[in-house]
Amino acid sequence: MSTTRTALVIGGGIAGPVVATALRKAGIEACVYEAYPGPSYGIGSGLALAPNGVAALDIIGAGDPVRDVAVPIAGMSMSIGDKLLRMPGLSDVPPLQVVDRSELHRTLHRHAVAAGVPFEYGKRLFDVREEASGITARFTDGSTATADVLIGADGIHSTVRGLIDPNAPGPDYTGMLGFGAITEYDAALAPDTMTFAFGKQAYYLYWPVGDGRVAWGANLPHKEYLSLTAARAVPKAHWLDVLRGTYRDDTPGGELARRTTEEQLEVVGALHIMPPVPHWYRGRMVLVGDAVHAPSNSSGQGASLAIESCVQLARCLRDLPTAEAFAVYQRLRRGRVEGIAARAAKVNHSKTLGPVARKAMQLLVPLMAKTVMNPEKTMGPEQRYRIDWDARADSELAIA
């Protein structure tokens, strides 16, 4: 039986509103505490939500609002040099939903507020005090808040992760900076298709969004680590010069870079991946989303896994005493998220291939598409995963 009645959710990005909404559905009062002075709508560029992630949003009633602001992507292609190869897919799953990160934040925030979730801003956590009766969060503005549990949904640079385990690993830099834009491009592109392109110098991807516009994202190899703040401190004119030089010999990468304006360019900064985190919880604290598992963007599953974990954590706290709930939650999630992260790490390596390896890849990909790129093995278990909200949380472990 659950012993959790109230929860403090630290972080108001993607995971925070989702876990708070799921907790309310589970009968647990949750309040979100965000360090920013208001909703953080202006961070990041486009991201893809896989069918499993959208299905988890459906559980809390947020699936349709997200579909309303997303672009469905039913097909995928790979481009290497002058070869464009249509990739095999799964015929029995819905399309990916590609959405601007800011729009996703806004949609999930509105949905949470409509569900009755309160938000407090300017609340930067720095310490906690645990007692037998609950846990108290201490914020840098001098205020405090107390509840039965505290959930760290505070992203890849999580403060809560360090409070749970001061020796916990931090995020690893992938060696790439992220950029994104939506620009005008009138060339004929396959509709509802995302193309993963291995350019002559760097990797990029693109997809049509309608009305003669194309969204594209660049993964730019960069030895120096630049945080979001540091990357945005560099004039956009400089980054456009770099992108145009990097992709000048690629089609359509060169044209996309040339057409992108400073106003259109979204600077994301360093791309990260989280190594396995030994301790997901301690006492009355637990981690969710990027704070505990952030595969590289190559996975196509980062946001979807975060959403899944939010819903699973709410189920566990609904059905079980706190300590048992956290343990079951970790057992339900660790194998899945770390397996996907390992797959993404291999894909990430291919984005930084040298010219010789890139040429070899160009020759091998058509064969790989018929053999090792079997979608049943690479995407089937990931995208068909569904959460049974009505089932008792620990029943899955009993079946296993």
Image (cartoon, rainbow, N blue to C red):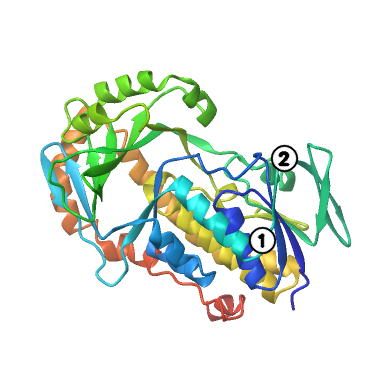
Q: Is residue 156 visible?
A: yes
The vertical placement of 166 against 2, above or below, is above
The vertical placement of 234 against 386, above or below, is above
Q: Splitting the image into 4 quarters, where does residue 118 fall?
A: bottom right
> Which numbered circle lies on residue 237?
none
| Residue 204 locus on image (x, y percent) | 28, 37
The vertical placement of 188 against 75, above or below, is above
**Looking at the image, which is closer to me, 392 or 165?**
392
**Looking at the image, which is closer to me, 364 or 326?**
326
Q: Is residue 330 visible?
A: no
> Which numbered circle lies on residue 124?
2
**Discs 1, 2 touching: Cβ within 8 Å:** no
At x 36%, y 41%, the residue is: 348
Q: Residue furthest left?
A: 82
| Residue 6 locus on image (x, y percent) | 76, 64
At x 43%, y 19%, the residue is: 235
Q: How many marks?
A: 2
Element marked by disc 2: loop
**Looking at the image, which is closer to me, 33 or 136?**
33
> Which numbered circle lies on residue 117?
1
Element marked by disc 1: loop
Image quadrant for the N terminus? bottom right
The vertical placement of 123 against 242, above or below, is below
At x 16%, y 47%, the residue is: 189
- Local crowd size for mark 2, using a 10 Å CA cut-off: few (<14), some (14–19), many (≥20): many
Kind of residue sitting beneath label 1: Val
